[in-house]
Image (tube, coloured by chain):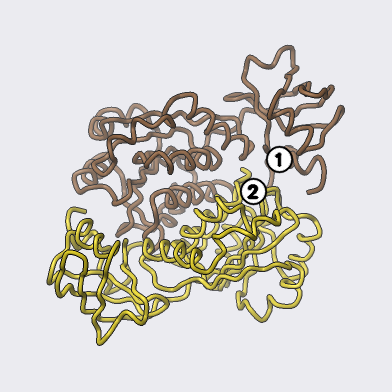
Chain colours: A brown, B yellow
Amino acid sequence: MNRILYEPGECVKGVVIFRKEKARHIRQVLRAGAGDYLKVGEIDGPMGTGRILNVSSNEVCVAVETEALPRKPPVDLLLALPRPKVLKRLIPQIAALGVGQLFLTNASRVERPYFDTHVLEPETMRALLLEGLTQAGDTLLPKVRVVRRLKVFLEDELHARVDAEERLLLHPHGGEPLFHALHAGQARSSRVLLAVGPEGGWVPFELELFEKAGFRRVGMTHRVLRSDTACVAALAAVAMRGDSRPGRRPGEPAGNFRLFGPL
Amino acid sequence: MNRILYEPGECVKGVVIFRKEKARHIRQVLRAGAGDYLKVGEIDGPMGTGRILNVSSNEVCVAVETEALPRKPPVDLLLALPRPKVLKRLIPQIAALGVGQLFLTNASRVERPYFDTHVLEPETMRALLLEGLTQAGDTLLPKVRVVRRLKVFLEDELHARVDAEERLLLHPHGGEPLFHALHAGQARSSRVLLAVGPEGGWVPFELELFEKAGFRRVGMTHRVLRSDTACVAALAAVAMRGDSRPGRRPGEPAGNFRLFGPL
């Protein structure tokens, strides 16, 4: 846990009480006690620093001072719904890398039963997203939306829902190198909507829909990557573009584990 | 399967017989028959194109014309051994992204029982590597070595085993942006040795060892990534650097699935 998150309602008069797994983590992993500082954050709200007031066997009481709202990640992701097992391990990674919106879409090569997975239930999804945010030290929950009809979405809804200046379709064969697309001209600072296809790729009809919707085809390497690998790789490429400061943000303390115990 | 691989001994007078899963894939997924062409490759040998001679219920007989040896990927990876479950799903991704050598190393924060996993047994490891190569369309098996004593390795063996000009240590806090490190000056074309730590990071003693061994610290984003996410992200960053041609190699046919059936 690189930032310990709490629900908006959990902070009463500037004090949050952490219980269960979070309390255990503070006590046993961070080995923190009264007077120590923690990186904390309100889910979908500001990040902050917490000073531990007291630690009991099952509760850790923390006085919170909130700081700035985190910036919204400069990328939205449209991902052909992968099979449940892959989805489940991919969601925390997507949240950790950071996206503003996540569209999980149907496609010709997406199997229908994938939509029945419990991973898409709001509670499960939220828990997986929070796992990623806690890891990354962020507080902003990606907005997740399930898209059942890709054509309708691309033709009628995309414009209203996404404000990205660059629409890039990751494709294993052909197209401009993603690296160039992300660094050419204005692209360096623009919002990006990335589309990542299903195993086996998009079918020609879908490729046409994307083209009509203003997507440019981009590729990463001459190697053909699995859809989930490509997804992590491409999001990381966008994150690296926007972030020339690799360490902490200005004025922000380092990770929790730097504040307590051995590095 | 974006390239169907065979063992060196399986090619007799230019003909390979594919059986079991590979034969099934050719028949049912690629829907290929006599006269069709396939992307094939000899494990740790040249890539090639195969012309199907005939297809029976459990065998596919292919005449192979070998082409160039693939280039060795421009990166070696030193990875603190992750827990078995993570290792198992990471190995195919590492092989797909491409590394020359893979050193799986002990570290202060690596738990001893991790070394007992069956994933490290040569047969299991080889199968996982081949899964990644088949996906990526490559034939070169990464050379995997288990490093039990990181200190001895960094002090006494590294120099003889690794010829990378750039030694980069991925670290969540501080350091030069990986992006800069990969694109500054000569770095664009040099071999890279990447070191990725365990969950919780390297301890100070280990960081010193790396520094003495000539590693520079680099970071990717201000977000703290899980070790396996960071690993995929960093390898992809190296791959994108070296590969300004995103599609296929010159003269090489597109992926198997482009040759047969719908895209």
Residue at the farthest front position: B58
Query: In the rendered structure, the residue with mark 2 lies on which chain?
Result: A
Q: Are marks 1 and 2 in contact (CB under 8 Å)?
A: yes
| Amino acid type at image mark 1 | Pro
Whether residue A108 appears in this view of the structure is yes
How far apart are the alpha carbons under marks 1 and 2?
A: 9 Å
The residue positioned 25% from the left and 60% from the top of the image is B25
N-terminal of the pair, mark 1 or mark 2, is: 2
- Which corner quadrant of the image does residue A192 belong to? top left
Quarter holding the N terminus of chain A is top right
- What amino acid does circle 2 point to? Arg
Question: Residue A250: which numbered mark, if any?
Answer: 1
Left or right: B122 with respect to B26? right
Few, some or many C-alpha atoms within 10 Å of disc 2 (few <14, some 14-19, many ≥20)? some
- Find residue B159 and report its horizontal and vertical position in percent: 68, 78
The answer to which quarter of the image holds residue B31 is bottom left
